[in-house]
Amino acid sequence: MKLDFGVLFRSVLAYLRVSLGMMALLLALSSPLLIPLISSMEICSSKKALLSGAMIFGVPEVATIVALCLLGKERLQQIRSWFVRHLLKLKPSRHSTRLSYYMGLLLMVVAGPVMNIVLFYFPTFGVDWIEYRKVIALACDITFVAAIFIAGEQLWRKIEAIFRFEPTTTPH
């Protein structure tokens, strides 16, 4: 059996392009998550600021362009559709009652913006909280996300409607 090195080379090259493209896409999505690691490093503050800014404004854009070049438009669309299909499975599908809807709404308003504003912008409001502020903030964030699921499908549809553009037709 004869080994065709051209076919082997093309298949290895295609595998390498997909692997590098996926790594570039993951880098683009996860680079802002490296900011806490950068801020805890023992380097001067100007370098921390430069690296943190690059993780927000430079690296994601460049890595996305590299991923697009390596993966191609069709493969990137396949990845996007797979991701959206699996993300939509997280959407609450139950019909909520009036009580659960308003309970979820109340939790969103209280635990989300109100508690985080009080915790971080008015630290003297609760002097006893100061040492547990990060833990309380994390609990408020988790409660905020859970409130979306507690409120159910009605709230989810309203949130979706905010971000959906539907052109209106004007009668002539």
Image (spheres, rainbow, N blue to C red):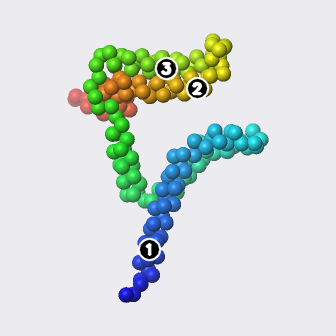
User: Compared with residue 86, is residue 12 higher up or lower down, i.e. above or below?
Assistant: below
Q: In the displayed image of the protein, which residue is found farthest to the top?
A: 125
1 or 3: tag closer to the N-terminus: 1
* Lower sequence index among marks 1 and 2: 1
Residue 113 falls left or right of residue 90: right
Q: Secondary structure at mark 1?
A: helix
Decide if residue 95 is in sight here: yes
Residue 131: % across, % down: 66, 22
Q: Residue at x 44, y 21 (%)?
A: 108
- Residue 30 vs residue 130, the one in the foreground: 130
- The x and y percentages for residue 80 are 39, 49
Quadrant showing the C terminus: top left
- Whole-angstrom CA distance, mark 1 to mark 3, is 54 Å
Q: Nearer the viewer, mark 3 or mark 2?
A: 2
Residue 155 sits above or below residue 33 on the image: above
> For mark 3, what is the residue?
111
Q: Quadrant of residue 148?
A: top left
| Residue at 46% across, 71% down | 12
Callout 3: few (<14), some (14-19), or many (20+) C-alpha neighbours within 10 Å? many
The amino acid type of the residue labelled 2 equals Val
| Picture quadrant of residue 146 | top left
Q: Position of residue 141 (x, y in %)?
A: 50, 27
Q: Which residue is label 1 attached to?
A: 10
- Indicate the secondary structure of the residue bearing disc 3: helix
Q: Mark 1 touching mark 2, by CB under 8 A?
A: no
- At label 1, counting other C-alpha atoms closer than 10 Å, the crowd grade (few under 14, some 14-19, many 20 or more) is few
